[in-house]
Amino acid sequence: MSAGPSPFVPPAQPGPPEPPAKGLRLAGAVLTVATVLVGLMAGLFFAFDVSVMPGLAAGDEQTYVTAMRAFNKAIDANPLFGMVFLLALVAGVLSAVLEFRGGRRAVALWVGAAAAAYLVVLLITFTVNIPLNNELADAGDVAGMKDFGIVERFKTTWVTTNIVRTLLCTTALAALARALLVHGRTTR
Protein backbone atom coordinates (compact mmCIF):
# COMPACT_ATOMS: atom_id res chain seq x y z
CA MET A 1 0.00 0.00 0.00
CA SER A 2 1.09 3.54 -0.62
CA ALA A 3 1.46 6.02 2.17
CA GLY A 4 -0.71 8.70 0.58
CA PRO A 5 -3.07 11.05 2.34
CA SER A 6 -5.68 9.45 4.52
CA PRO A 7 -9.05 9.23 2.82
CA PHE A 8 -10.64 10.52 6.01
CA VAL A 9 -8.73 13.83 6.15
CA PRO A 10 -10.01 16.40 3.65
CA PRO A 11 -7.32 18.17 1.62
CA ALA A 12 -6.45 21.68 2.77
CA GLN A 13 -8.55 24.30 1.06
CA PRO A 14 -6.99 27.56 0.05
CA GLY A 15 -8.09 30.42 2.26
CA PRO A 16 -9.47 33.69 1.04
CA PRO A 17 -7.00 35.71 -1.00
CA GLU A 18 -4.97 38.07 1.06
CA PRO A 19 -5.55 41.75 0.36
CA PRO A 20 -2.74 43.46 -1.52
CA ALA A 21 -0.06 44.95 0.64
CA LYS A 22 -0.42 48.62 1.46
CA GLY A 23 2.58 49.48 -0.71
CA LEU A 24 1.06 47.68 -3.68
CA ARG A 25 -2.21 49.58 -3.31
CA LEU A 26 -0.39 52.92 -3.00
CA ALA A 27 1.73 52.15 -6.06
CA GLY A 28 -1.39 51.23 -8.03
CA ALA A 29 -3.18 54.42 -6.97
CA VAL A 30 -0.22 56.63 -7.94
CA LEU A 31 0.11 54.79 -11.26
CA THR A 32 -3.58 55.37 -11.94
CA VAL A 33 -3.26 59.08 -11.15
CA ALA A 34 -0.22 59.39 -13.44
CA THR A 35 -2.15 57.68 -16.23
CA VAL A 36 -5.15 59.99 -15.89
CA LEU A 37 -3.01 63.14 -15.76
CA VAL A 38 -0.97 62.19 -18.83
CA GLY A 39 -4.20 61.26 -20.60
CA LEU A 40 -5.63 64.70 -19.89
CA MET A 41 -2.52 66.36 -21.31
CA ALA A 42 -2.52 64.14 -24.40
CA GLY A 43 -6.15 65.09 -24.96
CA LEU A 44 -5.45 68.80 -24.61
CA PHE A 45 -2.57 68.71 -27.09
CA PHE A 46 -4.61 66.55 -29.48
CA ALA A 47 -7.54 69.00 -29.35
CA PHE A 48 -5.21 71.82 -30.38
CA ASP A 49 -3.83 69.67 -33.23
CA VAL A 50 -7.15 68.69 -34.76
CA SER A 51 -9.41 71.66 -34.06
CA VAL A 52 -7.97 74.79 -32.49
CA MET A 53 -4.93 75.39 -34.68
CA PRO A 54 -6.54 74.39 -38.01
CA GLY A 55 -9.54 76.56 -37.11
CA LEU A 56 -7.33 79.55 -36.35
CA ALA A 57 -5.31 79.02 -39.53
CA ALA A 58 -8.52 79.35 -41.56
CA GLY A 59 -9.08 82.90 -40.29
CA ASP A 60 -7.22 86.18 -40.59
CA GLU A 61 -3.99 87.02 -38.75
CA GLN A 62 -5.57 89.46 -36.27
CA THR A 63 -8.10 86.84 -35.18
CA TYR A 64 -5.28 84.31 -34.88
CA VAL A 65 -3.29 86.58 -32.56
CA THR A 66 -6.31 87.61 -30.49
CA ALA A 67 -7.53 84.03 -30.05
CA MET A 68 -4.09 82.57 -29.22
CA ARG A 69 -3.52 85.29 -26.66
CA ALA A 70 -6.89 84.49 -25.09
CA PHE A 71 -6.16 80.74 -25.03
CA ASN A 72 -2.73 81.29 -23.49
CA LYS A 73 -4.08 83.70 -20.90
CA ALA A 74 -6.86 81.27 -19.92
CA ILE A 75 -4.41 78.38 -19.58
CA ASP A 76 -1.82 80.42 -17.68
CA ALA A 77 -4.43 81.71 -15.24
CA ASN A 78 -5.90 78.28 -14.54
CA PRO A 79 -4.31 76.62 -11.49
CA LEU A 80 -5.94 73.29 -12.35
CA PHE A 81 -4.09 73.24 -15.66
CA GLY A 82 -0.80 74.02 -13.92
CA MET A 83 -1.37 71.23 -11.42
CA VAL A 84 -2.19 68.64 -14.11
CA PHE A 85 0.67 69.81 -16.34
CA LEU A 86 3.35 69.45 -13.64
CA LEU A 87 1.88 66.67 -11.48
CA ALA A 88 1.76 64.33 -14.47
CA LEU A 89 5.56 64.14 -14.30
CA VAL A 90 5.69 64.03 -10.50
CA ALA A 91 3.14 61.20 -10.34
CA GLY A 92 4.99 59.31 -13.07
CA VAL A 93 8.36 59.54 -11.33
CA LEU A 94 6.84 58.67 -7.95
CA SER A 95 5.04 55.71 -9.50
CA ALA A 96 8.27 54.42 -11.09
CA VAL A 97 10.05 54.67 -7.74
CA LEU A 98 7.25 52.89 -5.85
CA GLU A 99 7.06 50.12 -8.44
CA PHE A 100 10.84 49.67 -8.45
CA ARG A 101 11.03 49.59 -4.66
CA GLY A 102 8.18 47.08 -4.63
CA GLY A 103 10.18 44.75 -6.83
CA ARG A 104 7.97 45.22 -9.86
CA ARG A 105 10.79 46.03 -12.26
CA ALA A 106 8.77 45.51 -15.45
CA VAL A 107 6.13 47.98 -14.26
CA ALA A 108 8.81 50.45 -13.19
CA LEU A 109 10.40 50.23 -16.64
CA TRP A 110 7.13 51.07 -18.43
CA VAL A 111 6.41 53.94 -16.03
CA GLY A 112 9.97 55.22 -16.33
CA ALA A 113 9.66 55.26 -20.11
CA ALA A 114 6.40 57.20 -19.80
CA ALA A 115 7.97 59.69 -17.39
CA ALA A 116 10.92 60.20 -19.75
CA ALA A 117 8.59 60.86 -22.69
CA TYR A 118 6.57 63.32 -20.62
CA LEU A 119 9.75 65.06 -19.45
CA VAL A 120 10.58 65.71 -23.12
CA VAL A 121 7.08 67.23 -23.47
CA LEU A 122 7.89 69.64 -20.64
CA LEU A 123 11.27 70.51 -22.15
CA ILE A 124 9.69 71.27 -25.53
CA THR A 125 6.99 73.34 -23.85
CA PHE A 126 9.44 75.42 -21.83
CA THR A 127 11.98 75.90 -24.63
CA VAL A 128 9.75 76.35 -27.69
CA ASN A 129 6.03 76.81 -27.05
CA ILE A 130 6.13 79.11 -24.03
CA PRO A 131 8.75 81.46 -25.56
CA LEU A 132 6.56 81.75 -28.68
CA ASN A 133 3.51 82.38 -26.48
CA ASN A 134 5.44 85.12 -24.66
CA GLU A 135 6.59 86.68 -27.93
CA LEU A 136 2.99 86.74 -29.11
CA ALA A 137 1.83 88.32 -25.83
CA ASP A 138 4.53 91.01 -26.11
CA ALA A 139 3.85 91.86 -29.76
CA GLY A 140 1.73 94.88 -28.88
CA ASP A 141 -1.80 95.89 -29.72
CA VAL A 142 -3.17 93.62 -32.42
CA ALA A 143 -4.95 96.52 -34.15
CA GLY A 144 -1.62 98.28 -34.66
CA MET A 145 0.42 95.23 -35.67
CA LYS A 146 2.11 95.55 -39.05
CA ASP A 147 4.37 92.49 -38.89
CA PHE A 148 2.53 89.19 -38.43
CA GLY A 149 5.65 87.03 -38.73
CA ILE A 150 4.83 85.61 -35.31
CA VAL A 151 1.70 84.03 -36.82
CA GLU A 152 3.84 82.21 -39.40
CA ARG A 153 6.13 80.95 -36.60
CA PHE A 154 3.04 79.67 -34.80
CA LYS A 155 1.73 77.98 -37.94
CA THR A 156 5.07 76.23 -38.45
CA THR A 157 7.12 75.89 -35.26
CA TRP A 158 4.40 76.02 -32.58
CA VAL A 159 2.05 73.70 -34.47
CA THR A 160 4.83 71.21 -35.27
CA THR A 161 6.10 71.05 -31.71
CA ASN A 162 2.55 70.65 -30.45
CA ILE A 163 2.15 67.62 -32.72
CA VAL A 164 5.37 66.24 -31.22
CA ARG A 165 3.99 66.88 -27.73
CA THR A 166 0.81 65.03 -28.66
CA LEU A 167 2.77 62.05 -29.97
CA LEU A 168 5.01 61.96 -26.89
CA CYS A 169 2.04 62.22 -24.50
CA THR A 170 0.22 59.50 -26.40
CA THR A 171 3.32 57.30 -26.22
CA ALA A 172 3.56 58.00 -22.48
CA LEU A 173 -0.13 57.18 -22.07
CA ALA A 174 0.31 53.87 -23.91
CA ALA A 175 3.30 53.00 -21.70
CA LEU A 176 1.30 53.83 -18.57
CA ALA A 177 -1.61 51.71 -19.81
CA ARG A 178 0.82 48.81 -20.26
CA ALA A 179 2.22 49.49 -16.78
CA LEU A 180 -1.30 49.34 -15.32
CA LEU A 181 -1.87 46.01 -17.02
CA VAL A 182 1.38 44.53 -15.74
CA HIS A 183 0.80 46.01 -12.28
CA GLY A 184 -2.67 44.48 -12.22
CA ARG A 185 -1.21 41.05 -12.88
CA THR A 186 0.89 41.36 -9.72
CA THR A 187 -2.22 41.72 -7.59
CA ARG A 188 -3.73 38.38 -8.66
Image: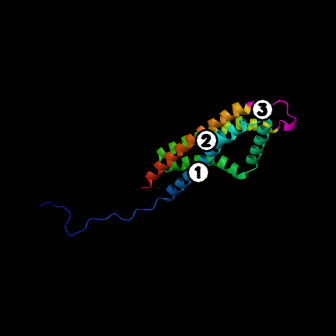
Q: Mark 3 points at which residue?
A: 150
Report the front residue among 139 and 128: 139
Q: Residue furthest left?
A: 1
Q: Mark 2 points at which residue?
A: 118
In the picture, which quadrant includes the N terminus? bottom left
Residues in magenta? 138-152
Would you say the residues marked 1 and 2 are in contact, meaning their CB atoms lie under 8 Å apart? no
Whole-number angstrom distance, CA of label 1 to CA of label 2: 13 Å
| Disc 1 element | helix
Whole-number angstrom distance, CA of label 3 to CA of label 2: 27 Å
Left or right, 135 with respect to 96, comes to right
Q: Which mark is residue 36?
A: 1
Residue 103 visible here: no
Q: In terms of sequence position, does the residue under pointer 3 or pointer 1 come before the other?
A: 1
Q: What residue type is labelled 1?
A: Val
Q: In terms of sequence position, does the residue under pointer 3 or pointer 2 come before the other?
A: 2
Q: In which quarter of the image is residue 127?
A: top right
| Disc 2 element | helix
| Disc 3 element | helix
Left or right, 52 with respect to 109, comes to right
Residue 63 visible here: yes
Report the front residue among 98 and 122: 122
